Image (spheres, rainbow, N blue to C red):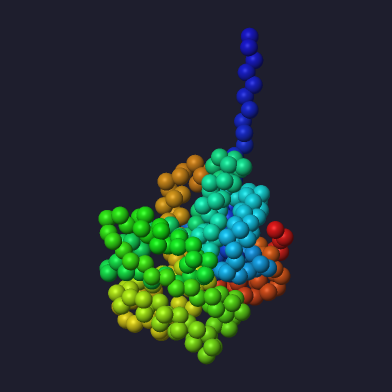
Amino acid sequence: MDTFICFIIPMIMGPIGVFDSGYGGLTVLRSIVDRLPQYDYLYLGDNARNPYGSRSFDVIYHYTKQAVDYLFSQGCELIILACNTASAKALRTIQQNDLERWVDHKRVLGVIRPSVEHLIHSSQSGVIGILGTEGTVKSDSYPLEIAKFSLQRKMEVWQHACPMWVPLIEDNSFDTEGAHYFISKDIDILLSKSKDIDTILLGCTHYPLVKNIIEKYVPNGVEVLSQGDLVAQSLEDYLRRHSDLDALCLKKGNVRFLTTESTLLFDERATQFYGSKVHSKQIDL
Ligand code: DGL
């Protein structure tokens, strides 16, 4: 009689990885955890090498790939790049060239697509303003993606880079006279590009921290949109449509934090972005 040997490959479940260059992705993680509290999450902030905003394509790709490799090595099956700059400059290359090194089901998603899917329906005038880092704006990812997804409707996209904002936010000096000056000036520049802009997307995950200030300088009738809720909603939908991947995501409700900088500094600052106490561990990439 033939003997059949049956190997059962154990399913290894892991947390959902959330990556940002620093603190900004915590605003996205907050929305995700509020919407999907049953999952486990592993946040990684590359604070030691932040900001990414004005770095070259090669450097952002290299740093982001290191972070993705690290999160995969920690058991993550799905990673969200909660950083527009990394989504704009590294996501496509990682999806096309690097994912095949890992087992089939590993996935990396960004924040641009969910924002675009929302924007093309939410703007009445079809004229949208995007505020972001130099890297995001120069990549033209938003205009290109919006053109791809709005075939039924002609849309206009105006962008403006705000290189001063991330350092002011990371440094906790955004509610000062100087910061207000830069914020109001950048908004004026964006709005001067078209009088029909009715929606401004905060295309950098750091910017929700200054949303209240931004709204002071934006006329009535112009909506200012943060990405957190859009990304959380889209993730929920993605997991519903990919039950195989969902089955590999741990669901014990644990949230852990990693930073490439000192944990003392991270824990103190991260609370402001995340909205509750954070205890991180320092790692090297
Ligand atoms: N939070 C990142 C983003 O959404 C940018 C911050 C940085 O410049 O490192 O683009």
> How many labels, in total?
0
Asked if residue 183 lies left or right of residue 121, the reply is: right
Left or right of 52: which side holds 200?
A: left
Location of residue 13 in the rendering, given as x and y in whole percent from the top left corner: 59, 45
Q: Position of residue 88 (x, y in %)?
A: 50, 60
| Residue drawn 33% across the image and 75% down it | 194
Q: Where in the figure is residue 247, as x and y percent of width and height?
A: 52, 44
Closer to the camera, 267 or 283? 283
Task: Work out whether residue 113 can be spotted.
Answer: yes
Q: Name above or below for residue 244 compared with residue 141.
A: above
Give the residue at the far bottom of this rendering: 177
Residue at coordinates 68% horizontally, 74% vertically from top-left? 265
Give the quarter of the figure containing the N terminus.
Answer: top right
Whether residue 30 is visible here, answered yes or no, is: no
Please tell me in which quadrant of the rendered image residue 202 appears.
bottom left
- Quarter of the image where the C terminus is located: bottom right
Reply above or below: 176 against 150.
below
Given residues 137 and 7, the one toward you in this image is 137
Q: Position of residue 244 (x, y in %)?
A: 49, 41
Side of 130 where 11 appears, left or right: right
Please tell me which residue is depicted at 32% across the width and 73% down the height of the picture: 198
Residue ID at (62%, 75%): 269
Q: Nearer the viewer, residue 256 or 109?
A: 109
